[in-house]
Image (cartoon, rainbow, N blue to C red):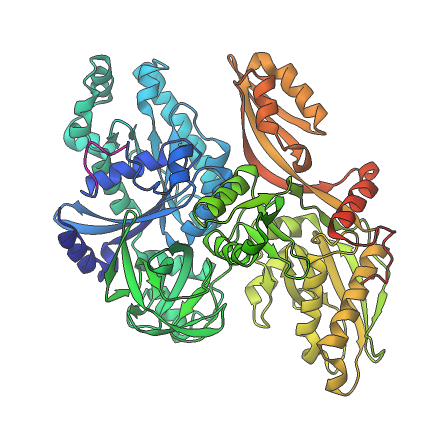
Amino acid sequence: MADVDVVKRVRELMNNPEQIRNICTCAHIDHGKTTFSDNLLLGAGMISEDLAGKQLSLDFREDEKERGITIDAANVSMIHKLGNKEFLINLIDTPGHVDFGGDVTRAMRACDGAIVLVCAVEGIMPQTETVLKQALRERVKPILFINKVDRLIKEVKLTPEAMQQRFIKIITDVNKLIKSIAPEEYKEKWQVNVQEGSVAFGSAFHKWGLSVPYMQKHNISFKEIIEAYNSETQAELAKKAPMHQVVLDIVTRHHPDPKQAQVYRIPKIWQGDLESSLGKSLLNCDPQGEVAFVVTKIVVDKHAGEVAAGRLFSGTVRQGQEVYMMGAKRKLRVQQVNIYKGAQRFQVESAVAGNIIGLIGLKDAFAGETVSSIEMEPFEAIKHIFEPVVTKSIEAKKASDLPKLVEVLRQVNKEDPSIFVSINEETGENLIAGMGELHLEVIENRIRREKGVDVKTSNPIVVYRESILKTSREIEGKSPNKHNKFYFIVEPIPETVYEAIKNGEIPDGRIKKTDRELWDKFVKLGYEMKEARSIKQIFNGNILIDSSKGIVHIGEVIELIMDGFEQVMREGPLAREPGIKMVVRLKDTTLHEDAIHRGPSQVLPAVRESIRGAMVDAQAILFEPLQILQVDSPSEYLGEISKLIGNKRGQLLTVEQEGEHLSCKIKLPVAEMFGLSNDLRSATEGRGNFFVVDQAFERLPMELQDKVIKSIRQRKGLKIEAVSESEN
């Protein structure tokens, strides 16, 4: 099919949101997502039959091909015909490895439907659970594809009855997960169902797929599939039951179009006034409304510069149009509007609400940025399920490359916002923090190979968290001119509240005076309404409450108090590590009458001094990051695995044995995890692997507190002597 023809048809379909489906793949690593996506491209006539399943068209970066894994989410638009009607399917292929989970979260913001792939042999794995959580948190509707059925026939040699039992178990497990994670109103509504046709099974590698409606319509039985494999004629199956046809039929029937989806997604991802004209335009996916676009990915193209890919939720965006970027707080002109076809982009004059597009010209945009034709309430920040826990310092081998490295690090941070980059231009120390060793290794290689800067990195550093053991007394902080005083107390956060913040039920950010929905959530968690209305900010799992009464000028300094609170939560008193699990209460303040004497240079040091002092008084301690892992291996290695866990200060949580196969959940401090892959391989003679299931922060054992605090302070060039209340 000629490119010109495809682009012309895509342009026509773009203008009709009812005929658009914005979807993504999501699954555990190696469950076949990219091969699966290749098949869909084949069906849309985007790549040749010989290459499908081998080309891995959406893994178009060199390191993805070398490692055989997807690292970046990739966008593609396809055309699918159902009956006499054509549909535009915008697909994002996402990574499965936990270290690249940030890309999955960002892709979910742009999509309304997800195809959850599960391997027929392995069943639901930890990362399947994580990506499903990410989808449901963004109100993205799932359907299920059970992949690698050929392995059940050829390798496991199951009977048709045993295979049916296997499918039922996977479907039941997926539905259980949906029930436990989905928002209340979708727990039942979004269950996947074989009879209704929201479940399919097949082999992406052999290009066939089946659903119950397709089997009934085309009179195909499962017996025929098994016979085809037994007689080595499985190549015929791709013609009898083409996977792309089956899957895209399900997508078209069971996934919502943008108009349907935005009605229930917008209230979840946008906190603005739904009754305003912009609110109505967003809910209705109105092409006539103001432009509202969310950037979900930045790709740096050496010819075009930065391409901001994302979802247009409202309005029509045109080439040459002036738009406002909420985060950067400035106006820019859209130089180009692009649509996708694999790694290729095609230019169009304009695009209407409901489409996934790329915009060129949005300099300094970042993933999660809101772009609009007017100043508006930005969309909810895109929150990742896991936080970066491994950090390395990175420097240029040649001093002359230092300015270039700083520029490259800023670029890397835009391309992958789940990498945290901190550039200290005074000390020259640059830090990169990521989800794991592999994540940082990939970034380092890209800096060397794609960006052309030769770098060296330190050994991995673990980022700890600072917290407290009890409620502090009221601690005073004085401004440098002694005219302003602030009194804070700090107390541990209730566990239920922390869990609600961690799960994304309570969003991070400064709270608006009209946010009744959020107050109600706090009331459900046990707060009085009066106190809930006094909560000013949630920042990195900590809460700021204004418990002061009758302070005349409080409104003028409250933003500065929040700035000071943020600064301490970024750098606590013990070792300048981030704060966690604390409630900080402003109890009282005395302020100078004259505004000139209560500016930032007076208020910020006083707020910092008081909060840090209160933390020390409340027995400030370090929390360490831990990861909960699933370890799979043959059962004979249980003793070796237990020994390995014991040597690494870990805990064995559960052990499940099925025949010769062993699956155990363990909890390990991140500080002890470096080199775990090699250690596990040695302990299990290369037959064991592990996957990250969850992340937690727990108190560092008391006997290690002083040693770790000293080593961090030494590394950061801070004074080594004991922390005092007044240190600021």
State the image coordinates of residue 666 (x, y, percent, origin top left). 63, 29
Eyeballing the image, is 590 above or below 188? below
Left or right: residue 120 compared with residue 539: left
Eyeballing the image, is 560 above or below 226? below
State the image coordinates of residue 98 (x, y, percent, origin top left). 50, 39
Q: At x 66% / y 42%, what residue is drawn? A: 461
Q: At x 57% / y 67%, what residue is drawn? A: 516
State the image coordinates of residue 264 (x, y, percent, origin top left). 40, 58
Left or right: residue 464 compared with residue 373: right
State the image coordinates of residue 175 (x, y, percent, origin top left). 43, 36
Instruction: Between residue 88 and residue 440, name the one nearer to us.
Output: 440
Eyeballing the image, is 564 above or below 659? below
Q: Magenta span covers which residues?
A: 47-53
Left or right: residue 406 compared with residue 103: right
The quarter of the picture where residue 701 lies is top right
Q: At x 81% / y 65%, what residue is drawn? A: 610
Left or right: residue 460 compared with residue 50: right
Q: Is residue 133 visible?
A: no
The quarter of the picture where residue 422 lies is bottom right
Q: Main secondary structure of the magenta part?
A: loop
Q: Is residue 115 magenta?
A: no
Q: Is residue 49 magenta?
A: yes
Q: How many marks?
A: 0
Instruction: Between residue 82 and residue 57, name the one nearer to us.
Output: 57
The quarter of the picture where residue 349 lies is bottom left
Instruction: Between residue 193 and residue 504, name the one nearer to us.
Output: 504
